[in-house]
Image: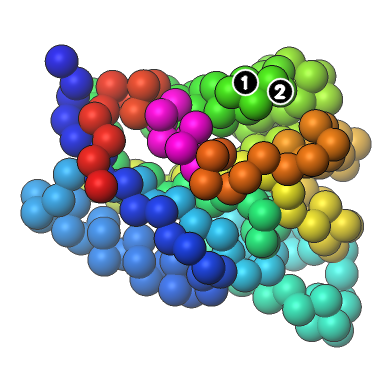
Amino acid sequence: MSRGDLLVRAIDGLVPYDAGLAMQAEAVAARRAGGVPDILFLLEHAPVVTLGRNAAASGVLATAEELEAAGVELKRSERGGQATYHGPGQIVGYPIVDLRALRIGVAQYVRGLEETMIRAAGAFGVAAGRRDGIVGVFADSGRGPKLGAVGVRVSRGIAFHGFAFNVAPNLDHYRFIVPCGLTAVGVASLASLLGQAPPIPAVREALVAAFADVFDLTPTR
């Protein structure tokens, strides 16, 4: 018997970062009020570099002019973590979940988000894994470049923000930042590892299935 329902919202097209924040704020309020079950938004952002709450400006290597020329926005974020990049070809997952209802803490939740991406990668024949002391998911069973990032915020028991999983983003855009504060790790995507990108809808479904299984929730649409 599952712990509850998971309302899945897969959004087509590119979502501006600020619109994603507004979407989450509305969902957090609704979840706190008990009007909706846990929600999982899956979307792709327009190109943007974001800095987490504790991120230093030195995590951005590009000038404002270079970012503008490449069509990449720069935004501060209330999530945890350092500098990261979002853009087309990367699936961003924003779960809005009540950790108290799931009876888990923040550390266990973060591990669950990592496990979600590890299982989704495995569905396409990519062996991903963790690295000791570093949040995120890495290729080659944890020994290779970074494939997925995690950054969350928890407010009065409700978790939001979430994870970013690289399917086929423009990896060249990562030169603008020190990804997640890691200087010597590198960044990968399913496309770079497999030689071609799996379809975004198929990867979305793999992420939904993995997330629901990890957290024992029943997906609904």
**In the depicted structure, whether residue 49 falls above or below residue 4:** below
Q: Amino acid at mark 2?
A: Val
Residue situated in front as seen by the camera: 6 or 134:
6
Q: Which colour scheme appears in the figure?
A: rainbow
Residue marked by disc 1: 122
In this rendering, position of residue 171 left or right of residue 55: right
Measured as percent of width and height from the top left, residue 72 is found at 73, 74
Give amino acid for label 1. Answer: Gly
When the figure is inspected, residue 85 is found, relative to residue 129, above or below; the finding is below
Q: CA distance from mark 1 to mark 2?
A: 5 Å
Magenta stretch: includes residue 1: no
**Residue beneath disc 2:** 126
Q: In the image, is 128 to the left or to the right of 80?
A: right
Contact? badges 1 and 2 (CB < 8 Å):
yes
Whether residue 101 is visible:
no
In magenta, the rendered stretch is 204-211
**Residue at the image position 19 percent from the left and 35 percent from the top:** 5
Find residue 108 and report its horizontal and vertical position in percent.
42, 23
* Rendering quarter of residue 84: bottom right
Q: Is residue 159 above or below residue 64?
A: above
Left or right: where does residue 142 sit relative to residue 28? Answer: right
Please provide percent x and percent y for residue 181.
76, 45
Q: Residue at x 44, y 66 (%)?
A: 20
Dot 1: what SS?
helix
Instruction: Residue 59: give x, y in percent of width and height.
Output: 78, 57
Kindly tell me whether residue 129 is visible in this rendering.
Answer: yes
Q: Residues within 10 Å of mark 1 (few under 14, many from 20)?
A: some
Q: Which mark is residue 87?
A: none
Q: Tell me the SS state at disc 2.
A: loop
Above-or-below relation of 13 to 205: below
